[in-house]
Image (cartoon, rainbow, N blue to C red):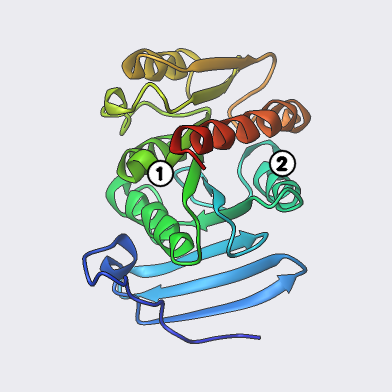
Amino acid sequence: MASTTEPDEASDGGLSPLRELKVIGTQQIEIAPGIEHCELFTMRGLLTILWHGDPDAEHVVLMVGGAMGGLLGPAGGLYHELGEHLATKGIGTLRVSYRRPNDLEMCTHDLAAAADLASRRGARSFITMGHSFGGAIAIRAALMLGRHCAGIATFATQSAGCEQVGALSDDVPLLLFHGEEDELLPPVVSESVRMMAGHGEVVLLEGRGHLLTDAGPALRARLDPWIDDAFAAQDLAAGT
């Protein structure tokens, strides 16, 4: 069923990324079992979210695309496939389409607002993921999430916008995938981000370009246990 209700405000009455969007209306509808399509209308554009899994999940993965936006991610739909799979394990996934692609500040705000929205339904722990330009958004949003961030995964990330990654806690795992044949951003870019962070792991994918075409199976095989481990480690540290 479609809805046009406005998001609930934060219970403490303070500022929040979602409130700062100044949402003037929303709609959401279940487009397939376990997948909800959400639209948040603002005076500065439309924020679209595809929400996989239990909306009340405590563990949530946030996914964003590159400088042109999009919801599928790299590797021919990696985000959709991961979202469906993670839902079977009780992990929620929000695939976020920016209001204004290629705007660092607005796109970071969009991802933080998506986390805020999920937290109002019960989310307590987040992993951020981004492709290309979205790698910077994933890192920037993770820094905003602070202790609520369980990990960051990037795919062919750019380095612009990642300058503050050194402030990331060493306890937050950072996994950077990059195609060895990337025609837009060479693999050394991911390595430079890892060096700025002072920790993390760069995974090079032989023969793959910027879109990481045909790398889906390898990415899913690596990400599946990594996501489980990242959330488990954060739960252990929090004593939950």
Badge 2 element: helix
Quarter of the figure with residue 143: top left
> Position of 175 compared to 142: left or right?
right
Find disc 1 in the rendering and name its residue. Answer: 148
Is residue 215 among what the camera can see?
Answer: yes
Q: Nearer the viewer, mark 1 or mark 2?
A: 1
In percent of width and height, residue 66 lies at: 49, 42
Q: From this viewpoint, which residue is outermost toward the left?
A: 14
Nearest to the observer: residue 74 or residue 53: 53
Above or below residue 145? Residue 217 is: above
Above or below residue 201? Residue 91 is: below
Residue positioned 69% across, 29% down in the render:
225
Kind of residue sitting beneath label 2? Gly
- Tell me how far mark 1 sits from mark 2, CA to CA: 29 Å
Find disc 2 in the rendering and name its residue. Answer: 76
Residue positioned 69% across, 25% down in the render:
222
In percent of width and height, residue 7 lies at: 41, 77
Nearest to the observer: residue 48 or residue 70: 48
> The N terminus lies in which quarter of the figure?
bottom right
Pointer 1 and pointer 2: residues touching (CB < 8 Å)? Answer: no
Above or below residue 29? Residue 110 is: above
